[in-house]
Amino acid sequence: MSDIAPIAPETPIGGRLRRPDGGFYAPKRGVTGWILFDPAVQPFFTLITTFVFAPYFVAAVAPDAVTGQALWGYATGAAGLVIALSSPFLGAVADASGRRKPWIASFGLMMVLACAALWFVAPGRTDLIPLALVAFAVATIGAEFATVFNNSMMPDLVPPERLGRLSGTGWAAGYAGGLVSLALMLGLFAADPGTGKTLAGLDPAFGLDAAAREGDRASGPFSALWFLLLALPMFLFTPDAPKRLPFRAALVAGAKQLKATLAALPGQRNAAFFLAANMIYTDGLIALFAFGGIYAVGAFGWGTIEIGLFGILLTLTGTIGAFVGGRLDDRLGPKAVVTGALVLLITAALGILSIDGEHVLFVVEVGGPAPGDGLFASTSERLYILFGIVIGIAAGPLQAASRSLLVRVAPAGQTAEFFGLFALTGKITSFMGPLLVGLVTDLTGSQRLGLVPLVAFFAIGLTLLRRVRA
């Protein structure tokens, strides 16, 4: 992490650089603590949203795969709508109050409690579907809001020329945290219901019952405990902004500032076009990750082990992509990195749409997966994995460079507010992606056709991004 800490072109005071506002950038341990927040929250997205609990819900709790995908889409969309409506105001309040950590702690606790509740969602219990969906939605809201306020700390940590590297390293660390947590979950906890063994060939740890899918359900409390441990260094070592206004005064000031910002936003060309582009392409990315594992359940009959291995591959490539993307960000600029990532995502999404159990490239017939063939034995499965790897490579740089680009277009002193707007534009239509997936899946009875709208999101986002001058 030493290359992330600020390095002064001139002699720093006490070993630390001064910020333009007269304060100091964070020391090394403060930067490291901030970076660790990304891997702290990532298991929620890796284990719950994508690779373990969501496929488990579709395969073992919902009455069938199509209904499960539709319900999961509605829950994701509902959470996104709450985030969209609330995040800009909360960001403006945080800017007025100054402090970030109390907000991170409150929303982090919300995520922890909701994740723990997922343990109680037993297989075959359709009466527990409301519990699963509500707990997932609440955890999503907590995780996203905590991330908004953690992101808004970036400008106080390192000089502007290091923001791309900081953001990229944070995303890479997040992917690495997701990779390690997924490997632990598959190797020690989640077991094949048929064999009763984990991917490592072991009995599930702590006597977890494979038949009751307790390993899959443990992904909830596991994610909660992981967050509590890895987020602690940020609270202990990363400096927070000084307190400015009491809470009630910050509410009033935040509302006034948000109103003024929204009124002035049409005149801030770069910020407006970037936020609009982010609104569209983030929607597509969220839905693509949310339904990638779910689609594989229906198309190929994958279980926890297959989806978990697929997740490890995507997370590994995402780690590499985010790390390299952070370096490219500082060298080429964040806009170039986001543009390249969107081109890759459009290609990969079209490729995934061309695959089902018996076809690739829409019309080429191949032998579908059959019992006893082994892991990923069919051509369609292997091609699906290939396109998934491309998504992993592109997703990390897209998210990391978008975060650093926002720092560059946000007005000074309004970082948290603009990260609230950033979350708004990442969420205000995020309910539309999952909602469209759910509706099209319902109307067509096809999981593959349900993913068609996602390509349009990436293409429109890319078109809007071209209007941004970084």
Image (spheres, grey):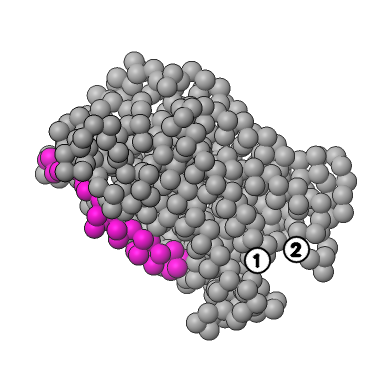
* Residue 387 located left or right of residue 268: right
- Residue drawn at x 36%, y 36% is 162
Label 2, secondary structure: give it.
loop
* Residue at the disc numbered 2: 375
User: Compared with residue 72, is residue 303 higher up or lower down, i.e. above or below?
Assistant: below
Q: Residue at x 23, y 31 (%)?
A: 10
Q: Nearer the viewer, residue 150 or 131?
A: 150
Tag 2: amino acid: Leu
Q: Which residue is mark 1?
A: 305
What span is in magenta? 220-245
Using residue 193 as the reference point, say whether residue 114 is left or right of it.
left
Q: Identify the image quadrant of residue 313.
A: bottom right
Counting every numbered tag in the picture gives 2
Query: Do the numbered discs 1 and 2 sit on residues whose CB atoms are within 8 Å?
Result: yes
- Which SS type dominates the magenta stretch? helix
Give how far apart the Cα atoms at labels 1 and 2 are: 9 Å
State the residue at coordinates (57%, 34%): 341
Residue at the top extreme of this rendering? 267
Point out the residue furthest to the front here. 11
Residue 222 is one of the magenta-drawn residues: yes
- The x and y percentages for residue 159 are 30, 34
Instruction: Identify whether 152 is placed above or below 76.
Output: above
Which residue is painted at 43% across and 32% down in the image?
330
